[in-house]
Amino acid sequence: MTDTASAASHLAAAPPLRPDAPWLAPLAGYSDLPFRLLCREHGAAACCTEMVSAKGLLYHSPGTRDLLATTQQDAPLILQLFGADAEIMRRVMPGLMEQGFRWFDLNMGCSVPKVVKTGCGSAMSRDMDNALAVARAMVEVAGEGRVGFKMRLGWQAGEETWREMALRLQDAGAGWITLHPRFARQGFSGEARRSALRELAAALSIPVIASGDLFTAADAVRCVRETGVATVMFARGAMNNPAVFDEYRVLLAGGQPPPPDADRLKALIRRHLELALAHSGERTALLKMRTFVPRYVRHIPGVRALRNRLASCLDRDLLEELLETHLTPQAFAEDGGSAGAATTDPHGEARP
């Protein structure tokens, strides 16, 4: 595992906040160091860590500090914390600053039951005063403009807190607001309400980042143009296609990304494995690939057979054999060129 302290000199790099600088979202179980590095190689201008428990850091929970692993190539980096106790935040933030971290995000949007039942994530919208106390604790240590806040519209329909919360966070010294315009009770159902992004971008003097339903590069370009947000944050879109960042930049500039290609996809998967092997043991790296590869190939004919074989794959040679067998030009031709395409709209994809 990479030593954070030895890589600390890069952590001061400021994350860009402009339309042509897309971000990778904090993704529990996905946005680890190898995946962040892969996304950076494909155009991600800034990346967030997986969400890290402030309480876990304070009490040295097993595996929590592993989530802080980084390298010189992993910049700009935003460390996302979750927690609903201002005093705990005050206690853990100085140690993170000592390690070199300078840019932070507070998770106020996660709707997973095990998170919200502790009062964290999107449950924080139900106690705005406490949420603001936690926010101020982070800003006091990190400094004004160095902490962002990722939030939802509120807990449920009829309990919209997003506008007031964002305005009060801005007054507390927030550097940016990321809005996923759904209610917590929605999870990932329904559609993201883009009109709220437009309203928030107009109401705030700090940047607003768009999240939610950005499955493809085309989705993100439409979002930026329709709402006037500072930039976009890819989550499920990046999990399905790490090249979405480059595709987005090309589309935003008026170009057309290249069509899906079997050789490029195999090269991407091989590079992901190479990065995973560089930062963990072979078994761990291959277990990770069993999580990622099914998402990368989800539209290709015969993917069920590939998934079935991946489920027990702990051998690099077998993985290579599977790629050569299933990721062929013929398979892409049968698919009609839709696999990973920048203009597809896979709203029926599996939810993480």
Image (cartoon, helix red, strand yellow):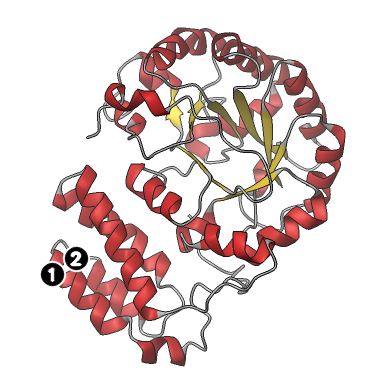
Q: In terms of secondary structure, where does tag 1 sit?
A: helix
Q: Amino acid at mark 1?
A: Asp
Rendered residue at 60%/9% (across/down): 140
Which label sits on residue 312?
A: 2
Q: In terms of secondary structure, where does tag 2 sit?
A: loop
Rendered residue at 23%/73% (across/down): 309
Q: Amino acid at mark 2?
A: Ser
Give the quarter of the image for residue 141: top right
Residue receiving disc 1: 317
Residue 91 position within the rendered picture, expressed as x and y whole percent measured from the top left: 45, 7
How dense is the environment of label 1, judged by Cα within 10 Å: few (below 14), some, or many (20 and up)? few
Q: Earlier in the sequence, mark 1 or mark 2?
A: 2
Camera-side residue: 332 or 283?
Answer: 332
Q: Is residue 275 left or right of residue 108?
A: left
How dense is the environment of label 2, judged by Cα within 10 Å: few (below 14), some, or many (20 and up)? few
Camera-side residue: 307 or 317?
Answer: 317
Give the quarter of the image for residue 166: top right
Spatial separation of the CA atoms under disc 1 and disc 2: 13 Å
Q: From the image, state whether disc 1 or disc 2 is nearer to you.
A: 1
Camera-side residue: 321 or 145?
Answer: 145
Camera-side residue: 193 or 44?
Answer: 44
Q: Is residue 98 left or right of residue 17?
A: left
Residue 308 position within the rendered picture, expressed as x and y whole percent measured from the top left: 27, 73
Give the quarter of the image for residue 289: bottom left
Which label sits on residue 28?
A: none
Rendered residue at 57%/72% (across/down): 257
171, above or below 315, in the image:
above
322, above or below 163, in the image:
below
Q: Is residue 60 left or right of residue 102?
A: left
Rendered residue at 66%/44% (across/down): 185
Residue 276 position within the rendered picture, expressed as x and y whole percent measured from the top left: 26, 50
Q: Confirm whether residue 340 shows in the render.
A: yes
